[in-house]
Image: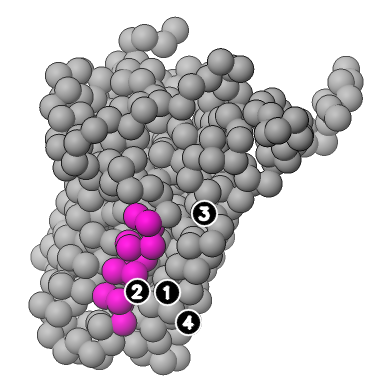
Amino acid sequence: MRFAKTSKLSVLDFIGFGFIRDLINNLLVSNMNPLPQHGKPTQPLRYFVIVMLVTFVALLVSAGVRATPGVLMVPLQNELGWSRASISFTAGVGIFLYGLVGPFAAAVMQSLGIRYTLIGALSLIGGAAFLSLWMTQPWQFLITWGVLSGLGTGAVAMVLGATVVNRWFVLRRGTMIGLLAASTATGSLLFLPALAALAHSGGWHAPVLAVSLSCLALIPLLAFFMPEHPADYGLRPHGAPHNYVQPIQPPGSPVRLTLTTFAQAIKQRDFWLLSFTFFICGFTTNGLIGTHFIAICADHGIGEVPAAGYLALMGFFDLFGTTLSGWLTDRYNPRWLLFSYYSLRGLSLVALPFCNFSMTSMMIFGIFYGLDWIATVPPTLKLANAAFGDKATPIIFGWILFGHQIGAACATSLAGLMRQIQGNYQDALILAGISGIFAAFVATRVGSKLS
């Protein structure tokens, strides 16, 4: 069944969310192209829905883990007497390793499979969080939440989304990666009010325990319900032609494959342009707002729970903004989409320190910033696919994402240091805003293969 065509705009079109209708239509009536199995028709829909749902949940939880140091910053400072700079440094190390592991994790997924990679990563994350319940010194926080958590969450990052989308979809990749990208930002923001409330009532131990149990509880779900390849179920990727042949995985160790692919990618100009723009993306989102927003609000008299609520508002609207970005990426030039996203984000950051931090102004900022939070992922992945091809893109996208996390790590540490020296975040916000505007113009130079 297809939606009837009319000459008038529907209500969804009128409010700008016609992409939701198209998404449902594409999922329910698209050419899933099932392969015959002994003459019996297949029921492909459930496999495509399951793989997207399980991946979405995994990314959601992982992103919530990565955002937890932002909730712990004030409680650890108050209860254990640690400096904000040292806590920010640990958060920065975790973000850095989160990005570094990405391309290697993509290669491991090709060699060992997505399921086993995710089970190992979540076991490491949950175990590290559980061990941190007994920490008393900053170096213990660095080992558990910086090193171990960073390594684990790096395998449950957007390289997972890129691998799943490239493996299961040929058409509508922008929309699908938009949904999965939304989960990473939504998870990092949506969990914050609950974690902040736990920290407020039970100290820093309560959110740490909640994170550990969440990761460990997710392992059985992945073990039993995470599909690997469409061909395992007699299917072809969504939109693949009838003569589609599943790509043969390259031989060799994951480390060698990752480094070889990287050596080939660095010879291309688009790799450096995409890495730079994603560096600024991380600098202006996870590193600054994701880690320091609660502390920024605290400097203006806003409590932890209300500040986390504004972050949750960003996460809610990011779900719409990033999904809409994926829908737009399937239809419009991704370079100009990136120009719009980076320039609007930069202007909003420059304006933030000059607002009055009232409830109204913070809600307006939360909605506007949330729509643009990680909307850059779908057009960036499309440009990467055009430049490097479907086979190499998950690993190369992991290296591009590494640039994102370097930017986030720099912003996390730099903003904490500037706050400690200057007593406020004004210059850090303005610096991030200007860098976002500059990245907008750099993005227009990417993707010469696209019209």
Q: Is residue 326 above or below residue 143?
A: above
Which quadrant of the figure contains the C terminus?
Answer: top left
Q: Is residue 127 magenta?
A: yes
Say whether residue 320 is left or right of residue 402.
Answer: right
**Residue identified by numbered label 3:** 226
| Quarter location, residue 448 | top left
**Residue identified by numbered label 4:** 197
**Residue identified by numbered label 2:** 126
**Residue identified by numbered label 1:** 216
- Residue 139: x and y in percent read 10, 77
Q: Main secondary structure of the magenta part?
A: helix
The three-letter code of the residue at mark 1 reads: Leu
Q: Dot 3: what SS?
A: loop
Q: CA distance from mark 4 to mark 2?
A: 20 Å
The three-letter code of the residue at mark 2 reads: Gly
Say whether residue 325 is left or right of residue 341.
Answer: right
